[in-house]
């Protein structure tokens, strides 16, 4: 093989490994399921529902709808659940 070909193959492999190692934060889509509390005007991720201080005036909907209603996140648990850290190459394709 030529020296130039080997160089480009090594560079491509290096960039691929770097792309799979460097993490980025990806926000979830608007279709993600959340729970609205209409009394407090907040939303909660389903994983945070048990520890959330919510009333009985609840509705299950999407994150997009909750943001359209100008509801705020119930806690930092919900904010953490709605953001994911993924490798760069996987994150940019989602």
Image (cartoon, rainbow, N blue to C red):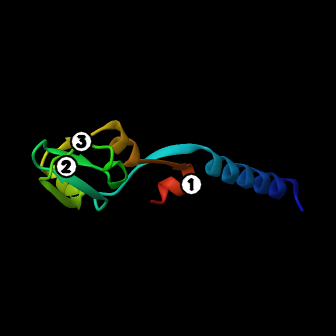
At which x and y percent is residue 19? 62, 50
Residue pointed to by mark 2: 67
**Label whose residue precedes the other's in the sequence (2 or 1):** 2
Looking at the image, residue 86 sits to the left or right of residue 52; the answer is right
**Which residue is at the front of the view, 78 or 55?**
55
Most foreground residue, 21 or 66: 66
The secondary element bearing badge 3 is classed as loop
Pointer 1 with pointer 3, Cβ within 8 A: no
* The disc label shown at residue 89, or none: 1
Circle 3 crowding by C-alpha within 10 Å: few under 14, some 14–19, many from 20: few
Q: Which residue reaches farthest right?
A: 1
Q: Height in image: 7 above or below 77?
A: below
Question: Is residue 94 found left or right of 75 in the rendered image?
Answer: right
Which element is circle 2 on?
Answer: helix
- Identify the residue at image location x=13%, y=44%: 41
Q: Residue at x 66, y 46 (%)?
A: 18
Q: Position of residue 92 (x, y in %)?
A: 48, 54
Q: Which residue is mark 3?
A: 53
Give x and y (percent) for residue 33. 29, 60
Q: Secondary structure under badge 1?
A: helix
Q: Earlier along the polypeptide chain: callout 2 or callout 3? A: 3
Residue 36 seen anywhere in this rendered image of the structure: yes
């Amino acid at each position: 093989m030529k020296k130039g070909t080997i160089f480009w193959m090594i560079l491509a492999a290096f960039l691929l490994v770097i792309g799979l190692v460097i993490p980025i934060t990806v926000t979830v889509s608007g279709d993600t399921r959340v729970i609205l509390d209409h009394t407090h005007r907040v939303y909660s991720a389903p994983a945070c529902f048990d520890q959330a201080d919510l009333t009985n005036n609840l509705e299950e909907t999407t994150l997009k709808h909750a943001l359209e209603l100008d509801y705020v996140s119930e806690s930092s648990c919900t904010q953490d659940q709605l953001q994911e850290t993924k490798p760069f190459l996987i994150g940019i394709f989602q």
